[in-house]
Amino acid sequence: MTRERKGMYLLTLILLVAFYGVLFLLGATGMMTRFVKSLIILTCINIILATSLNITVGNLGQITLGHAGFMSVGAYSAALFTKAGILPGIPGYLVGLLIGGTLACIIGIAIGIPALRLKGDYLAIITLAFGEIIRALIEYFDFTGGAQGLLGIPKVQYIGLIYGIMCLSVTLMFSVMTSRHGRAVLAIREDEIAAEASGVPITFYKTFAFALSAFFAGIAGGVYAHNVGILGAKLFDYNYSINILVMVVLGGMGSFTGATLSAIVLTIIPALLISFDEYRMIIYALILIIMMIFRPEGLLGRKEFSLSAFVHNVIKGRRVRE
C-alpha cells in the first residue's frame, strides 16, 4: 500500500469520526429531535441495503427483486433471538444481527444456486417470486407472529452504534469487492464467457456475491427490527425491493459511493416533502424522472468518489489561482 493511499484512508477515517462527533454533540446538547434521530437511523439502514444490493446488481450485473425478502429473514431472526433473552443488552443485539445476517446468507445461497442459472428478466422474476414466498411463510407461521406481526422487540436506537455498524458494513463490502474475489465478480459482469475461459469459477462467484449481498441485507433487517420494535410481513413486499433497487440505479450501478449518496438523498427527500402530504409522492416521482432524463447512468455511474482526486483538484486549483 502506497503512502498516499494510507494517507487517504486515514483522512477518510478522520472524516467519519468527525461526523460521529457532530452527531454526538447534537445528541448531548439536546438539539437532535426525535424526527431527526429516526431519519438518521433510517438513512443508515438504507445505506446498508443499497450498498448490499449494489453487489449483485452493480458488481455482478444481475437484476434481483427479492432483497426485501432477505431483509425480512434477518429482521425476524434477530428479533426472535433478542426476544428470547438468551443474551441481554448490546451483546445480545450484536449476536442477533450476526444470526440474522447468517440465516439470510444461508437462504441467499439456497435461492442463489438455482436462480443464478437464469439471467436478465427471468432472474428478476424468480427472485421476486422467492421474496413473496418468504413473506407468505412469515405470515403463515405462528412463532413469527403471523399476519398480526411480531410485537415486543427490544428497541435499540443508539445512533453511534448504528452509525458504526453502517460504516463497518460498507467498509467490509467495499473491501471484498475491491479484492481479487471482487475482481472475479466484476469479470463475470463484463464478459461471463471470457471470465470462465480465464479460469474464473462462475457458479461459485455468482453464489458468493448473492450470499454476501443477502448477509448484509439481513444485518440491515436486524437493525430495522430493533429500531421500530414491531414487525409486519406486509412491509417486506416487492415494493420495498423496488425502492432499494431505485437507490442503486439512481446512485450508479457498480458504485458504492453512488449507492450511499443515493440512499441518503432518497431517504431525506420524502422526509422533507412530508409537509406537502397530498403532492409528496408526485414531487418525489418527478425528481426521479428528471434525474433519469439528465443523468441516466446515475449520480456517479460506475465510478467511485475519490477523496485523493478531490484533494488533488483542490490543491491544483489553488496553485492555478496563485
Image (spheres, grey):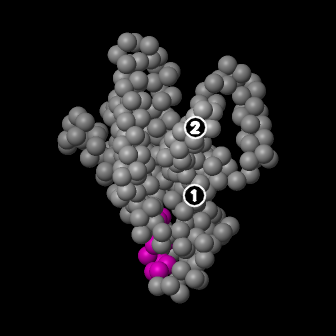
**Residue 9 drawn at (x, y percent):** 39, 46
Is 253 positioned to the left or the right of 221 in the image? right
Query: Of the numbered discs in the image, which one, if any, rests on residue 319?
Result: 2
Name the amino acid type tagged 1.
Gly
- Give the secondary structure at mark 1: loop
Q: Is residue 58 visible?
A: yes
Mark 1 neighbour class, 10 Å CA radius: few under 14, some 14 to 19, many 20 or more: many
Q: How many marks?
A: 2
Is 255 positioned to the left or the right of 92 in the image? right
Q: Quick check: is 201 in the magenta stretch?
A: yes
For disc 1, the marked residue is 254
Query: Residue furthest toward the front?
Result: 322
Name the amino acid type tagged 2.
Arg
Q: Earlier in the sequence, mark 2 or mark 1?
A: 1
Mark 2 neighbour class, 10 Å CA radius: few under 14, some 14 to 19, many 20 or more: few
Q: Residue at x 48, y 69 (%)?
A: 183
| Region in magenta | 200-210
**Residue 191 drawn at (x, y percent):** 60, 77
Q: Nearer the viewer, residue 20 or 150?
A: 20
Quarter placement of the N terminus: bottom left
**Residue 301 drawn at (x, y percent):** 64, 53
Q: Nearer the viewer, residue 38 or 296?
A: 296
